[in-house]
Amino acid sequence: MKKLALLLWKVPLFIQKCIMVGGGTIVGILIFVEVFLRYVLGSPLFGVEELILFIGMWLYFMGAAYGAYERSHIKAELINIWCKSERSLAVLRTTASIFTVALAVILVTWTYPYFHWELKKGGTSQALLLPKIICQSAVFFGSILMAFYFSLELIDNFLLSIGKKEIFLPLVDKKDQEI
């Protein structure tokens, strides 16, 4: 059971990291090539901006989901200045997590019809005629991952608020800590 749970953590994270690293590398190379061709050789490459947009959408939403996983997403926490008790702080974080999960679920419910509509419509981009579903599915799958990770954070915050230990702490690679 523990191996299955670990696998459920590691597989999406591995895919997210591959998309972020691979996509970031490809976007960097494409921008370099486009700038070189446009400003040095005076001959821009057709459709590069569109390709960067498609990859950029995946980068943005996988990065947002990864931030939700790491719990390093942007938070406006000034309450910890006034609130000194760990338990009351956990109760306030639980309340904030409830709103965060609710908003993430709303985002999923908004993105699904759009994803489904584009899947049926089968539209393509203007320059490269790439299926638009590639770009638009990033929004849907990224929002699902964010809702999932925010839900786990809510469970952990709730457990802390009732005096128990967290159970869904993010996996941290030792390589990531050695920066």
Image: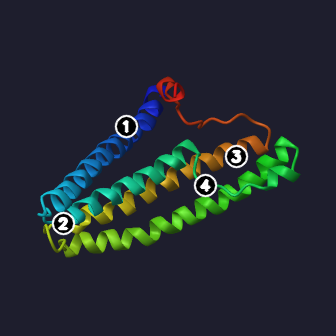
- The tag earlier along the polypeptide, 4 or 2, is 4
- Please tell me which residue lies in front, 85 or 28: 28
> Which dot, 4 or 2, sits closer to the camera?
4
Alpha carbon separation for disc pair 3 and 2? 40 Å
| Disc 3 residue type (three-letter) | Asn
Alpha carbon separation for disc pair 4 and 3? 17 Å
Alpha carbon separation for disc pair 2 and 1? 25 Å
From the top left corner, tell me how far across and down residue 97 is, in percent: 66, 55
* Res 86 → quadrant: top right
| Disc 4 residue type (three-letter) | Ile
Alpha carbon separation for disc pair 1 and 3? 25 Å
| SS at circle 2 | loop
User: For mark 2, does the 10 Å Cα neighbourhood hold few (<14), some (14 to 19), or many (20 or more) residues?
Assistant: some
| Disc 2 residue type (three-letter) | Pro
| SS at circle 4 | loop
Image position of 72 (left or right of 176)? right
Q: Which residue is mark 2?
A: 131
From the top left corner, tell me how far across and down residue 169 is, in percent: 60, 36
> Which dot, 3 or 2, sits closer to the camera?
2
Q: Which residue is mark 4?
A: 74
- Please tell me which residue lies in front, 131 or 35: 35
Disc marking residue 157: 3
User: For mark 4, does the 10 Å Cα neighbourhood hold few (<14), some (14 to 19), or many (20 or more) residues?
Assistant: few
Q: Which residue is mark 1?
A: 14
Alpha carbon separation for disc pair 1 and 4? 23 Å
Residue sitting at x 81%, y 50%: 80
- Quick check: marks 1 and 4 in contact, CB under 8 Å? no
- The tag earlier along the polypeptide, 2 or 1, is 1
Q: As drawn, which residue projects farthest toward the front?
A: 40
